[in-house]
Image: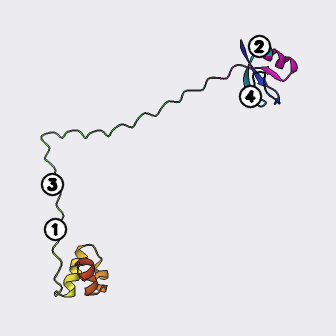
Amino acid sequence: MTKWIRLRETLSGGRADGRPWPVAGEVVDVPDWEYDHCIAAGWAEHADPPAPPKAVKAKEPEKAPEKAPEKPADVLPEAAPEKAPELAEPPRPSDPKPDWVDYAADRGLARDKAEAMSKADLMSRYGGRL
């Protein structure tokens, strides 16, 4: 039969079965004769068996997002999103710089930055020319 002991001190060397002794304060299982010997020598005291490790509950998988509830028939449908306005063709190379500034500003460049650029830079960056 197996019994449990708590070591009062760390023992050197190995146990009769070849396993090393644990450090002082740890609980270890031993056969009856080793239990009697360790208790009589004062190296250990009786201990209850350690509690079994608690099972770790696995994480539940995340749920898929719920579908939005269906709209009742009496609700008006949402307006279709407006299409982005189609951008015009770039100005011709012969067009004046203000046309190129307007074109660059329509594409998101700040107007003051567009005005600071040369016509050739605007044509290169926004017109695919040069």
Is 36 situated left or right of 58 in this image? right
Give the label on residue 86, or none. Answer: 1
For residue 81, what is the image quadrant?
bottom left
Q: CA distance from mark 2 to mark 1?
A: 91 Å
Q: Of discs 2 and 1, which sits in the foreground?
A: 2
Q: Amino acid at mark 1?
A: Glu
Identify the residue shown where x is 79% and y is 27%: 14
Q: Earlier in the sequence, mark 2 or mark 1?
A: 2
Residue ID for mark 3: 80
Is 22 situated left or right of 73 in this image? right
Look at the image and say whether residue 96 sits in the magenta stretch.
no
Question: Disc 3 on helix, strand or loop?
Answer: loop
Look at the image and say whether residue 45 sits in the magenta stretch.
yes
Q: CA distance from mark 3 to mark 4?
A: 72 Å
Question: Badge 4: how crowded within 10 Å, few (<14), some, or many (20+)?
Answer: some
Identify the residue shown where x is 16% and y is 50%: 78
Q: Earlier in the sequence, mark 4 or mark 2?
A: 4
Q: Are marks 4 and 1 in contact (CB under 8 Å)?
A: no
Give the label on residue 26, or none. Answer: 4
Question: Badge 1: how crowded within 10 Å, few (<14), some, or many (20+)?
Answer: few
Q: Are marks 2 and 3 in contact (CB under 8 Å)?
A: no
Name, please, the residue furthest toward the front: 18
Task: Specify the quadrant that holds the N terminus.
Answer: top right
Q: Earlier in the sequence, mark 3 or mark 4?
A: 4
Q: Amino acid at mark 4?
A: Glu
Q: Determine whether 99 is above or below 46 in the image.
A: below
Q: Amino acid at mark 3?
A: Ala
Residue 91: x and y in percent read: 17, 81
Q: Which residues are magenta?
A: 34-52
Observer-nearest of 17 and 106? 17
Question: Disc 1 on helix, strand or loop?
Answer: loop
